[in-house]
Image: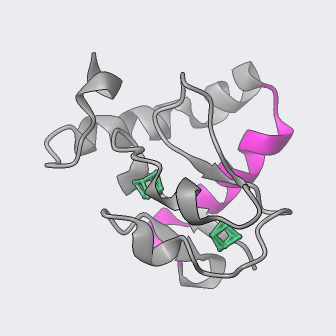
Amino acid sequence: MPYIIVDPCVGVKDESCVAVCPVDCIIATEEDTMMFIHPDECIECGACLPECPVNAIFSEEEVPEDQKGWVELNADYFKMDRNAFLAKHGDAIDAAKAKNKGSALANPALYA
Ligand code: SF4
Ligand code: SF4
């Protein structure tokens, strides 16, 4: 089962995980406020998990119950066009961004 990025990443997106992924499956555009893991490319090595400063990465089976929706969100990012993806998941991402605004690790550039 792949690893999943959940809501604490939104508004932080420091890319610490990207640097250690051996298969470069942690992806986002500059417009995105979080990173996403491609579920078909992740080799489940676990290298990214300890790198995340906000504990936003879980193996799929360990995603907390109240964040299960982020499993589908990560997968949809890679199979939907951008407008459809944002129509389906934009509200959840925006809500997480608002929630994380006060985080010490929030990236001011993502809130400009
Ligand atoms: S578990 Fe390994 S392969 Fe999967 S996203 Fe993390 S570093 Fe990349
Ligand atoms: S290390 Fe954590 S906060 Fe940073 S981009 Fe990866 S998942 Fe997001």
The residue shown at (62%, 37%) is 28
Pick the front one: 92 or 43: 43
- Figure quadrant of the C terminus: top left
Q: Where does residue 106 sit, x and y in percent of width and height?
A: 24, 41
Say if the magenta span includes residue 65: yes
Q: Can residue 112 be seen from the camera position used here?
A: yes
The residue shown at (75%, 53%) is 75
The residue shown at (34%, 38%) is 11
Looking at the image, the residue that sits furthest to the top is 112
The colour scheme of the drawn protein is: one colour
The quadrant in which residue 54 appears is bottom left
Q: Where does residue 80 sit, x and y in percent of width and height?
A: 82, 34
Pick the front one: 71 or 49: 49
Q: Is residue 68 above or below residue 60?
A: above
Count of numbered tags: 0
Ligand 1: image quarter: bottom right
Determine the main secondary structure of the stretch shown in magenta: helix
- Figure quadrant of the N terminus: bottom right
The residue shown at (71%, 79%) is 44
Residue segment shown in magenta: 63-81
Q: Is residue 44 above or below residue 25?
A: below
Say if the magenta span includes residue 73: yes
Q: Where does residue 21 sit, x and y in percent of width and height?
A: 64, 64
Q: From the viewer's perspective, tell me whether residue 76 is left or right of residue 97.
A: right
Pick the front one: 51 or 31: 51
Q: Can residue 64 be seen from the camera position used here?
A: no
Q: From the viewer's perspective, tell me whether residue 91 is left or right of residue 85.
A: left
Q: Where does residue 7 sit, x and y in percent of width and height?
A: 42, 53
Q: Is residue 14 above or below residue 63?
A: above
